[in-house]
Amino acid sequence: MPAFDIDERLERDGLLIATLGLCQLRINNDRRWPWMVLVPQRDGVTEIFDLTPLDQAMLTFETNMVASALKKATGATKINVGALGNIVRQLHVHVIARSEGDANWPGPVWGFGTAEPWGDDERKAFAARILENL
Amino acid sequence: MPAFDIDERLERDGLLIATLGLCQLRINNDRRWPWMVLVPQRDGVTEIFDLTPLDQAMLTFETNMVASALKKATGATKINVGALGNIVRQLHVHVIARSEGDANWPGPVWGFGTAEPWGDDERKAFAARILENL
């Protein structure tokens, strides 16, 4: 596998819980929503269409596996999936569990208010629930 | 192919410009951003992971084809891809061209301000540019 350097901000904002075939699986450190981030371990890639076809298929597979696990683990009303990258250009995919009445429902999570960091124990419990459901 | 009924709001907000293998390709009727919407022609599907594996692969292929065309047609700084569905539950994927200084940059487009409908001529010219680049 080629060398892989994760963007500083992605590293700071998220907590690595697993390495999948293509992606790092991270919990975004904001307890307002159950929010995972997938970071393909490829350097210099900004857009999904810049990945090789095989990597695109892998990213789809891993994104949908994580989305399904998040749905099962949380019972959320809706899973939001997004690849924006307007601020951090290194390709990353957000997978977020949304429920009626959550912060900014039914609007998007990005750019809304201020992150509330997870406590250590609740973050570990959340990570364990996700990993059980993968 | 099974019967397919498009959600009323998706139909009202968008303008069909092509039918791909899986999806309707629509222009969101908001000229503030070059904004495409892909609607898989499958009834009763809300989450990407509810699609069959083949349809998931098709959706990835068509999404990335449209994203690449939108990048080529607009020269945008970044393509935003998202499947949210908090308001309209029928599965649909947004593909939006973003550029520094556009409305709400670098924040998300969803829920921001009020849509500005395209004029007929500029919409047709935009649709033609997208189709040329597919």
Image (cartoon, coloured by chain):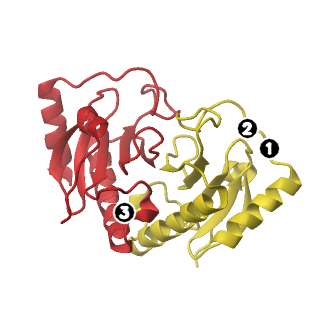
Chain colours: A yellow, B red
Q: What distance separates the C-alpha of mark 3 from that of mark 2?
A: 31 Å
Q: Position of residue B88 (x, y in %)?
A: 39, 41
Query: Residue, x 18% and y 42% (percent of image)?
Result: B16
Find disc 3 in the rendering and name its residue: B60
* Three-letter amino acid code at the position of disc 1: Pro
Q: Are marks 3 and 2 in contact (CB under 8 Å)?
A: no
Q: Position of residue A14 (x, y in %)?
A: 72, 53
Q: Are marks 1 and 2 on the same chain?
A: yes
Query: In front: A119, or B69?
Result: A119
How many tags in the picture?
Answer: 3
Query: In front: B74, or B16?
Result: B16
The answer to whether B133 appears left or right of B110 in the picture is left
* Three-letter amino acid code at the position of disc 3: Thr
Find disc 2 in the rendering and name its residue: A115
Q: Residues within 10 Å of mark 3 (few under 14, many from 20)?
A: many
The answer to whether A32 appears left or right of B94 in the picture is right
Q: Secondary structure at mark 1?
A: loop
Q: Are marks 3 and 1 on the same chain?
A: no
* Three-letter amino acid code at the position of disc 2: Ala
Chain bearing tag 1 is A
- The circle drawn on residue B131 is none
Query: Residue, x 83% and y 54% (percent of image)?
Result: A122
Q: Secondary structure at mark 3?
A: helix
